[in-house]
Each structure stands twice: as structure tokens, then as C-alpha cells.
Image (spheres, coloured by chain):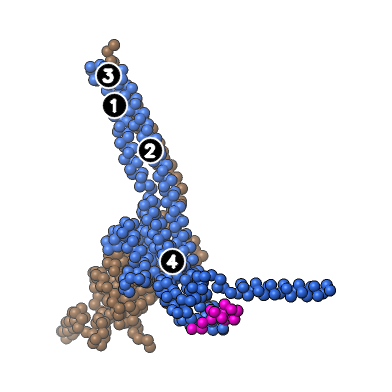
Amino acid sequence: MRARFFKTAIFFWLAVSLSVLKASADPDDLSETESRAAQAQLSLTGCLTRESYQLAEELGLVDHLTRLQHLREHDRHKHGVALSAEGTTLRLEITELVLTTSLQCQAVIAQIESETAISVEIRAALEGSRNKSSKTNAMANVLANGGLSSVGNLLQMPVETNTDSRYELPGEVVEAAGTIMATGLGAVALHQNKGAALSAPIDPNMLAKIFKRPNNSKTEYPDVIWRYLNSVPPGGKKVGPTRRELLIDRWIMLGRVPSLNTPKGRLYARTLAGTIPQTNAVTIDMLEDRVAMLLDLKAEVSQIYKELLNIMLVVRAL
Amino acid sequence: MKRSIVRAKIRAIMLVSCAAITMGEFSFFPAGTNAEPLSPTAASDTGTIKGNAAIKAIGPLHLSEGKVVMEQNQIAVLSDVADPIAEAELVGTIIDIHTTSSATGDTIQGMAIFTKGFSLPAIDSPHEKESIKGTDGVERIGRIVDVTPKILRIKTPAGVQAIPVKYISEIKSPRAFAFSLPSNTASVSGALSQSPVMPSSPPLKKEEQVLVSFRPTYIPDPNKPPAPTQLSSLHSQLTARHPGKRAFTLAATAAGVAACFAIPLGVAITCPPPPR
């Protein structure tokens, strides 16, 4: 009796486990995947975004995806039929490429983030130092403009009714001293507003290659990402500004860097990229520009993730 | 008498050939190639070179769209093909130009010693020791202070020594690179320019996309501690204390405040007291 009960229990447990396994083996519970699957059977270009298709072309994945499309395994696999050897190999190859590209993106982003963090840290320290100086200046201004002028006025008060204006001289002199001091402190405040300027040796960052300046192994881009940055975004003309050129155009338009057609612009680009010794050139303004540009670059590189996700969604749908 | 006539004839022949070489009359290359004339009699240490080539890297510098411009024993490395020569990353002098033949074709070889440029501090440090080994076997260690196509001057503890290029057997320097490029990329001629002038930078054409390779002559010792740089790190600059500056600021503030009170006080003392 007990043995029969155990047998029934084991059978029941196995049945439940198998049904759970079957359910988890089906990857297509998402309605998005289903809709993509329907589209993907018809056309790859209709299913992938133009940007994703471009990236797939750059990664050499279009052939893989087309072959997967011809295999038409999605529906059969959904109903529990195992994938073919060719399908499995293709999926593995695509996954390998996508994962490698994703990690390469992560490596580039890690380097950009590291450089951004250093720049932000130095800028914060420079701003802190500037704020401290401004505070001291403001206190001195209160003393000069307020304190001395008040003392001057007080000195003049007892003799204001006197017709001989010479008696107001001490008070006037004190007041004048306060005004002169306030003017001087104002000039100092203007100078302090720029903040301190530091110097740095040659240390190229991820902007160096973007500006076509010499970089080193630390700031090198993987080929896939460099090709992506140097490709024309789809949608516009076939021959037009690349993503890299569009980034630079945006920076010029926003006034972050002068036009690169001028020697001044090229020199500032070199300073931003850290490819020349920066003697008294590391200022708050320069660091602000560098941080903003690095963040823009990071955002552009991060777009690859979106396209990779699109490719993987299509692979799941095929 | 006969000797003097022969000498005069030799001189005349040399003069005519020099003029012809300069004007590009003698061509070593078949017609139709872009290459410029090559003097068959060019001595290895007196030739000049002219040409453009693409470059991807030199030492630790990576150049995605780099270009090398060579003319009149001068070499300039540009990081962007659109850059003017004045904004070259590296500028130097070429010595020991010669052509070699192999199964793959003729190549032009030589040595470039860089002395100027935006990126020179990235490959060289004034603290690095350079060495020149002569054909006499003596190695002179110091810093190369002057480079011409014919003579190198090195500053050693014993003083500045001038060494003719033809007596040099080996150079070890972080800014000296041996290069080689296919002979159809550039041309070599025997006319030596004593006052080389850098040319304007013509754009790199599609057919000029031939890569020039640079081989370093110096390998830094990885166990050697890094040479002290003139600039301290940004963090140390931020945290650096300047006692002199602080004392000056304090003294100036004290003097200013004292003056603000002392001047009116002085005026008050010197002024007549107000009438009662």
C-alpha cells in the first residue's frame, strides 16, 4: 500500500516537473517575440530596425539571420521540437558575437567612465577651492565696503554741520579706502571665478581618436565600435556625416570646441583629448567640456546595446 | 697638366650630373610610375627622399588616419591627413637612406630621428639616455643635440661630439625609428639639400595608402623606475601647499587692513581739531 502510494507520488512529481520544464523551455511567452516572429518570417529588414540591420551587417550576422529565417524553427520549437544542429550552431555563433560586442562596448564605456570620474573629481576639487576663495573674498568685501564705509560715515557725522569741509577729511579718507578695497576685491573675485589652472602631461583619453589625434593602447577602440562610430546613421543619405562627425558637429554647435578648421580649434581639441602637455590648461571650463563630451560619446557607444538587443530579439523569434 | 684636365673634367661631369639629378632628368623608374627620379650613384648617407605614405602606429602612438610626409631629408608625421605640416605630431630628420631589393620588391629604408612635434614628449623624455655606436666600436652615451643628414651631434659627459653618419653603426634612442616603405611610394635622389624646408602637405590619395612601418631602436627597461616628469599629478597639484604664497597673502591682508586704519588716523592727527 505504502509502496504504491510512493510510486503514485513519484509519478505525479515527475509529471509536474516535466510540464514545468516544457513550459520553461518555451522562450516565447512574450507577445513582442510572437509579433517579431511573425514579422521575421516575412522579412528580416521589416523586423530589425535600420540601425540594428546596419550593425548586423557590420558584425557579419545578416547571413546567419537569413539562414535561421530559412530554417523556420520557431513554431516547431515552440511546440517542443528540439532545434536542429544547424540552428543551434547558428544561434551559438550569433550569441558569441553579440556577447563579445557587448563586452567590448562595456570595456569602452568602462574606460570612458573612468576618465569621466577623474575629470569630475578634479573639477569638483577646483570648484571647491574656487568657492573657498570666493567666500573669503566676500567676507573681505563686507569688511571693506560695509565696515570701512560705515566707520568713514561715523567719523564725518559730528562735523557735518561745520562749514569747513576739511574736518570731514578723515571720514572721507576711510570711506575712500573702503571703496578702493572693494574695487580691488571685485577684480580679484573676477580672477578667482575662473578657478585655478593645473598642468598635466600627455595622457590621451577616449576623445583622442574621435578627434583623429594620437592615442595609446589604453584608449584604443575595438574595430566593431570604431566602425559603428565611423558609419553613416541610416535614414539619411548614404554618403553623409558619420556618427563621429555628427558628435563633433554637435560639440562645435554647442560651443564646447571651436571649429576644427581653425588652429585654435585643433589646439583646444588636442587639449581636450590630452594629446599635448597641458601647461596651466586644466581648468574648470575645460574639464566641464571634456566631461560633457565624454558623456556624449558614452551615450553614442551605448546605442550599440539597443541594437544588439534588437538582434537578439529577432534571433529568439526566428 | 694631364691630371688637372682630368680633374676639371670630373668636376664638370659631377656638376652636370648634380644639376640633372636636381631637375629630375635621370629616372631609375620606368615611365608611367608616380615615383620620382632616383640617382643611381646616390651614396647611402647623402640621398634625399620624397614621398607620402599612410601610417597606423609609431612607437606607443596609435594613428588611425596618420600620414607621413617625407621630403628633403625631413620627415613629418601627421595624425590627420587634413592637418598642416606646422601641426605635425612628429618632425625629424632622415639619415642613412638606402634602397634594398628583395623577392617582394624594392624597399626604401632609412632612419628617422624626431626632434620636434606635439607628440614628441609621448615617445621621448629628456631624462632618457641615447647612444650612438660608431664603426670604431665605441659607444657614446648621452643626448643627441643636433641631427643633420650628414652629421649627428651627441652631448656626452665628455662634451658634444660630432659623428658623421657614415661612421655610425648603431643608434639607440626612443625618438629614433628605422623605417621601410615600398619604393613606389617614395623616391630617393642623390641631391642633398643643406637647408631642408618642409613641404606643404598634399592630401593623401587612394593610391598612396601604402603603409610605412617604423621599428623602434630603443626598448625601455620594464624594471626601470619611471623617469621623474616635470609635472606632478593633478591630485598632488591640488593638495600641494604653498607656504610662501600663504605668508604673502597674510602679510598683504594685514598691511591692507593696517593701511585702511593708519591712513585716516594720520590724516585725523594732522588735521586741525574741529572748533567747539
Residue neighbourhood size for the residue with mark 3, other residues' Cα within 10 Å, grouped as few (<14), some (14–19), many (≥20): few
Provide residue A238's location: percent of width, then percent of height.
32, 74
Residue neighbourhood size for the residue with mark 2, other residues' Cα within 10 Å, grouped as few (<14), some (14–19), many (≥20): some
Residue that badge 4 annotates: A303
Residue that badge 2 annotates: A137
Q: Amino acid at mark 4?
A: Gln
Residue at image position (40%, 41%) is A133
**Chain identifier of the brown chain:** B
Q: Amino acid at mark 2?
A: Asn
Provide residue B75's location: percent of width, then percent of height.
30, 71
Q: Earlier in the sequence, mark 2 or mark 3?
A: 2
Residue that badge 1 annotates: A173
**Chain identifier of the blue chain:** A
- From mark 1 to mark 4, how far is it between C-alphas? 67 Å
Residue that badge 3 annotates: A160
Magenta span: A70-83
Q: Earlier in the sequence, mark 1 or mark 2?
A: 2
Q: Earlier in the sequence, mark 1 or mark 4?
A: 1
Q: Amino acid at mark 3?
A: Glu
- Mark 4 or mark 2, which is nearer to you? 4
Q: Earlier in the sequence, mark 1 or mark 3?
A: 3
Marks 3 & 4, CB-CB < 8 Å contact? no
Confirm whether residue B122 shows in the render. no
